[in-house]
Amino acid sequence: MHMHQKAILWATFLWLIITEAHGQLQLIPISPQQNRYLYDAAYFGRTEENGEDTTRLALPFFDDFSTNGKLGFHKGRPDEPDTSRWVRNGGTFVNNTIAINPPSFNVATFDGIATNGRPYDFANPFAVGITDQLTSKRIDLDTLRPQDNVFLSFFWQAEGLSERPDAEDYLAVDFLDRNNNWVRRWQQNGGTASSDFRYVILPINTSNFLHKNFRIRFVRYGRQSGAFDTWHVDYIYINKNRSASDSSLLDIAANGIKGRFLKRYSAMPMRQFIQNPQAEIADSLFLSVSNLDRRFNVFSYDAVLKDKISGRDLGLLADTTAIIGEFRRNLLVGAVNRGVGKRPPVVLPLNQRQLILETTFRLNTGERDDLVPPINFRNNDTLCQLTVLDDFYAYDDGSAEFAVSFNQRFGKLAYRYELNTQAAISHIDIYFVPILTNLQGETYNLRIWKQLDEEGGGARDSILLVQNTFVSYSDSLNKFIRIPLSRRIPLQGAFFIGVEQLSDKPLALGFDRNTDSGSEIWVNVANKWERNTRLRGSIMLRPVFAEDLVTSLPENQLNTLNPIVYPNPSAGTFTIKGNVRQVAVYDLQGRLILQKTSERAENFQNISLEGYPDGIYLLYLVNEQDIKIVKLALRRQ
């Protein structure tokens, strides 16, 4: 028997799903037949010798993951490690949000989530075993000898802003020998946090490893039911003519941007922003810089603001010089927003419907091109942050380090936002974290409130919408599901969006630890609203607003969509009669089956669901002023 202990972090009636209860687990050896995980079979020891990949890399081998892109606000599917160096689909993902003060921006993160964003084992919340792996392409060491002193070095961190590995969890490094066997060369067990990245250097100077098909493999062992037991790896470097004391490189690197362009939000509707731009813009942003050299260094930097849609430069936010000490990991250098500083103010193009503002920090470090050719250490000298001004609000930065939930049937969570001018909410973006238990297809209530009855326990809440909705998981990490509301709701000033749990199974929503809107969260699990005072972070729950100002219409004119769907039940083909511009058909698992759009409101005839199984489907019917949801029964006999 194997003890796998997890603690539970409570805060009021909210709890972060970073851990789970005590329990005894039985370890079962994993074989390819037993394992149905979604990463490639190469990770079970197959080394692609059957003609599938003949790539062989030469030294030096280097990856600090900075070439995966300058991750900003919209990340969509997280970047996978560079497939010119690494075998694909190993489950690790490249990000710049979960680790703390890495050597350079972007790390490879290992947890219990597969490449598709789902847990490796969604059936057993206590399952443990091998999950994420990061395996190199073949590295040709055939001409080298032990006296060439080949070494591998890397930095690692446990936990970061995610969940701490337990004592029996581990991160390991294996080498592939000339007999095609994986040999364990390093292993670090969990149990303690490491807020700093730690440095490891390992020799590859035995003849057993000096062959043309050499590989390295990072392996994570731990919980398989979600983003638990998290490890981070950065700055992986293999080269000859090194030594065990080789720990210094002349590299000054950007490792993160602290703060955001807006004061209150990470993103907001353009129409709300233009009401008072200077009140919404933050005073300053900061770039965090690392020095991987044993000597202090002097560098210059600037920061440029750009409209990413048009490509136009909007102004210079900083242009100065700084000094950084030896092996310093988190020097902060600033950029002042031009509405506040001494330079001429930046003029934003406020006549556009949408803006994506790109703030780019650029280091000028004077690093040599020929220091370790062909490695370009300047790849980690530039870092960007995106600020979206479109049709939605967001407190979060688009990346979940935890999940947040409450364990009470009919419990409610409310999240406060505030409009600068009147608008109509049309959708809600939500990110459910697939963790512990699969709730796909279960129902919950979306809610919108104008006010909460904090004194009366909720009896006098000003409720604007209660909409029963199916839980639906996205197909990748940190990807929101956009839920159309049954009707557009005019709003002004402060309002609340949220969820109501309808069973004892906890809904797990994405929780961002890099931003903090915790004071805007309220919870009601015992007929009493409690304002959150303990959790620091932001829930991945966003209101989306209609482009047109339907708030100017009287409320009794909003419900103009009265469709007729026939035949219902249907044998496979049906017609929609009414002023409809868009039809979207979903199954009860929340999957989009088909979608049709017309340039004008009209009837939709002979819509076919041939090929889909019998059952209940949801039709979302939309025109300029309203949204209706109709249940359609598909029954062929």
Image (spheres, rainbow, N blue to C red):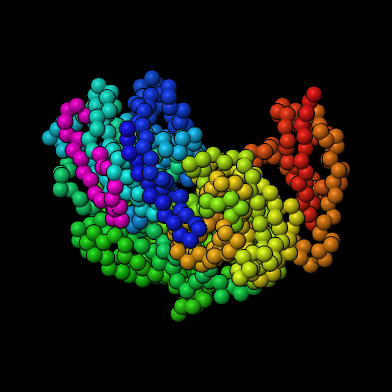
Farthest bottom residue?
342
Q: Is residue 424 above or below residue 207?
A: below
For the stretch drawn in magenta, the main secondary structure is loop
- Out of 542 and 204, give the one closest to the viewer: 542
Instruction: Mark yes or no: residue 175 visible.
Output: yes
Left/right of residue 247 with respect to residue 498 in the rendered view: left
305, above or below 474, in the image: below
Q: Is residue 200 magenta?
A: yes
Q: Say left or right for 396 vs 558.
A: left
Picture coordinates of residue 516, whole percent (x, y): 47, 64
Residue 464 is a magenta residue: no
| Residue 170 percent location from the top left of the image | 30, 40
Please indicate, yes or no, whether residue 432 appears anywhere in the rendered image.
Answer: no
Task: Write down the region rendered in magenta.
Answer: 187-209
Q: Residue at x 31, y 62 (%)?
A: 330
Q: Residue at x 18, y 38 (%)?
A: 203
| Quarter of the picture holding the C terminus | top right
Vertical comparison of 130 with 200: above or below: above
Residue at 27% across / 68% down in the picture? 323
The N terminus lies in quadrant = top left
The quadrant in which residue 2 appears is: top left
Image point (37%, 46%), residue name = 6
Number of labelled discs? 0
Q: Residue furthest top?
A: 50
> Could you say where residue 614 lies in the image, as x and y percent from the top left?
73, 29
Percent coordinates x, y for residue 64 in the rendering? 34, 47
Q: Nearer the viewer, residue 193 or 218?
A: 193
